[in-house]
Image (cartoon, rainbow, N blue to C red):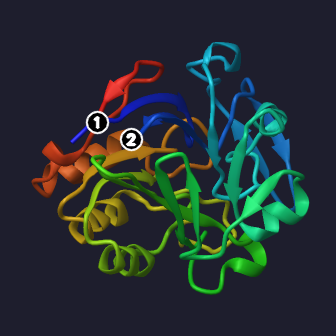
Amino acid sequence: MTSITASYVGGPTVHLRYAGQAFLTDPTFDPPGEYPGTGTTLRKLVGPAVPLAELGPVDVVLLSHDQHADNLDHAGRSLLASVPTVLSTPDAAARIPGVRGLVPWEQATVGAVTVTAVPARHGPEGAEPLSGVVTGFVLRADGWPTVYVSGDNASLDVVDAIARRVPDIEVAVLFVGGANVGRFGAEPLTLDAARASAAADLLPGARIVPVHHTDWAHFVDPLAAVEERFTVHGRRDRLVVLERGRPTEL
């Protein structure tokens, strides 16, 4: 089995070298700043650990959704036009030229890699009219670990459905942080620490790589909360915490 190399840029942005392709999740490369939106302003606290100019080639962008700046900021949006393959939701494809939209369980082939879009829910049940449609991804290639990238998903039912359909997930990149802008009361927009720990139970064969946990003001559970929860429940050894800007073999 061949190792994956992951470089953590910050926020939801990870550069993955996998089966001869360079994948980038939800590109965010702006410096700290504010992003006014409908009903709320998002505030970025930390800039990218790897500047866009130093990132290296990107063959595929895995974009969970395009409607929120903490998943696609100005610099990230500018990057998309130079990337050969950008996979996202059909809604994103309708808004951004060159994006290929996938519905849940639809597949795309990139080199030796099969990318499958999988469900995600950005908040509680029925969140879509306010949060919009989002997607996750599963990567498969012969001789390589199966990788799940959750995108901005808050639902354990969704993780359970994916785990049942794809039981051989070996690496799970989970968007955590318990993001909350007050839209759904106490219900988070992404996995909080408790839900991330429960997701690990649903993915018993997977190493868990937490991202999207610290760099924005609307995160309720920072990385330390995730680490504490995994430690208390005896699964800290399954948690792979990426050091910002340092390539790490998974």
In the rendered image, the quadrant that contains the C terminus is top left
Which amino acid does the dot numbered 1 rest on? Answer: Leu
Left or right of 95 in this view: 143 = left
Look at the picture and state if 148 lies above or below 222: below
Percent position of residue 83, x then y: 73, 37
Residue at 52% x, 44% y: name it.
Answer: 212
* Disc number placed over residue 223 in the picture, else none: 2
Q: Who is closer to the viewer here, 96 or 13?
A: 96
Q: Who is closer to the viewer here, 204 or 45?
A: 204
In the rendered image, the quadrant that contains the N terminus is top left
Which residue is outermost to the left? 234
Percent position of residue 230, x then y: 21, 52
Give the quarter of the image for residue 56. top right
Identify the residue position indicated by label 1 in the image.
250
Few, some or many C-alpha atoms within 10 Å of disc 2 (few <14, some 14-19, many ≥20)?
many
Q: Which of marks 1 and 2 is nearer the N terminus?
A: 2
The secondary element bearing badge 2 is classed as helix
Few, some or many C-alpha atoms within 10 Å of disc 1 (few <14, some 14-19, many ≥20)?
some
Inspect this view and state whether residue 177 appears: no
Left or right of 94 in this view: 29 = left
Which residue is outermost to the top? 54
Which residue is outermost to the bottom? 126
- C-alpha distance separating marks 1 and 2: 18 Å
Residue at 56% x, 43% y: name it.
Answer: 12
Nearer the observer: mark 1 or 2; the answer is: 1
The secondary element bearing badge 1 is classed as loop
Percent position of residue 176, x then y: 45, 53
Give the quarter of the image for residue 193. bottom left
Look at the picture and state if 105 lies above or below 234: below
Which amino acid does the dot numbered 2 rest on? Answer: Leu
